[in-house]
Amino acid sequence: MYVSKVRVKQEESLSIKFLHQMEVGDSRRLDLYFFLPKEMGINPQSLNEEEYYHSSITGRRSYYSSGLHLPLVQSRFVSQKKRTVEEFRLYLNLFAYQFSVAIETDSKELAQIEDFERFYSSLDELSEQVIHLLKRFRRNEPSDEKWKSYFENADNYLSWLCEQRLLKLLAHAPRTSDFNEINDRVVALCRAEALYRQERSYNSSQTIKDPNRIANKMLLLRRLIQQGVVLKEDLKTLGVGLKKMTTGIATAMVMLVVSALIIKAQGFFSGLTIALVLTLAVIYGFREIFKDDIRNALWRQIQKGRPRWSRTLSDTTSKNTVARQLVWLEFMRKKDLPDAVSQILTKRHSQNKIDAEIFHYGIHTKVSQKDFLAGYSTIQEQVNFSFVPFARNLERGKAKIYKEQDGKISNESVERRYQVNLILALREGKQAPQYARYKITMNRSAIIEITESDLPSGVATMEEAPFKEELKGKSPLVE
């Protein structure tokens, strides 16, 4: 399948994500410009960038394989006696990790389908794929005891995860009796997986009965299968020393003014009087009021355009550094936008040309020329943006639309919708930047849709490149 080098899609009701892959030696800069209508009430005063980054932006970076390096799903894998226990565990973890991410991704997408027929048809297809993948996985169970414990951990987790994801879909499924047959098949699959784990004594009866114990055990198993696949992240805040220096300069500036005012006050009042004391109190009061404002304004000016964080990605097995990243997050002025981004904005319909706050997220990644795990040359990055902090500021729909029919007047409530424009810029190495534009329609409770828009002529669009699908019958896991 050929799609854009970077995919932007909805993750949950109020979140979006971008997903891309990088190979050995890549140098890639990604910039996302969110144009938030001023009527949303989101600006530097109502949204702190640093708090938003730590609370609402999450990422996942891991090795990725197209299937060529998944001997576990090949019938000949177990017979390859030359492989070590460490290699077996690594390939097992890669398969289990990609399987778990795939079932999570597809189940989230399926949960957003409102049409009954399409929902149950997709649910039936998903359950069939789950059955197929689990059979392929279990067909290659090792007999060697040294390897078997790793297999059982992964098998236990995948069985439980598939059951939970399918049950969650059924719990929130559209209520109708027209698809009872599909509903019964999915329930039967969930029961079969629960019985399978019970017959193999994967979990004690006490653990099964206690939701907290089973959930925490599965969380531990997930961490085990991520070993060697998910890259370790070391995040550092940049400019700490510079910020301290800015605080010192701001304090010095304020004290300079305060000292001058005190000297003038002492010259104006003779001796220590109540008037002098009150004047000094007022001066010190104003100092406390304006000190933080001056410091923040000075820091924002100095910080403008500078990366806020650095991240080092390292292999959890070899401890080698796989990639380094710089991260930007800031509100921007329109005049600071790149020319191409400003040109893209001119292609909007007249009704969409409204004032907006510009929220910029940038990430520059340099991938190592070596130090990848043997057999792998690609890492995959997924970054999620939660729109919940944006939604908190939005108004609920209060308007009503009235209509008349046969002399009777009825009304319907109208929800307030907002359109966020997103322009994505991609620059690889020293190549010219490529662009894509998306329209995100949302209300206070959910993202309604995400659509990609055409770009003006002369603006470079993202080149199409092969992108590995995660499941849905096109997954590398079933190759």
Image: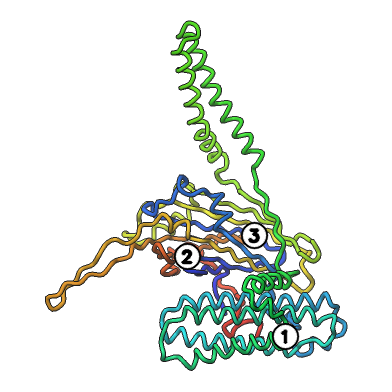
The amino acid pointed to by label 2 is: Leu
Neighbours of disc 2 within 10 Å: few (<14), some (14-19), many (20+): many
Say what amino acid the circle numbered 1 marks: Val
For label 3, the SS is loop
Q: Which mark is residue 73?
A: 1
Coordinates of residue 383 in the picture (x, y in percent): 58, 63
What distance separates the C-alpha of mark 2 from that of mark 3? Answer: 33 Å
Give me the residue at 15% from left, 75% from top. 408
Q: Earlier in the sequence, mark 2 or mark 3?
A: 2
Q: Residues within 10 Å of mark 1 (few under 14, many from 20)?
A: many
Question: In terms of image quadrants, where is residue 418?
Answer: bottom left
Under mark 3, the amino acid is Gly
In the picture, the disc for residue 479 is: none
Whole-Å distance between the Cαs marked 1 and 3? 36 Å
Where is mark 2, residue-wise? 14
Q: Mark 1–mark 3 contact, CB under 8 Å?
A: no
Where does label 3 land, which residue? 429
Q: Marks 1 and 2, how far apart in space? A: 36 Å
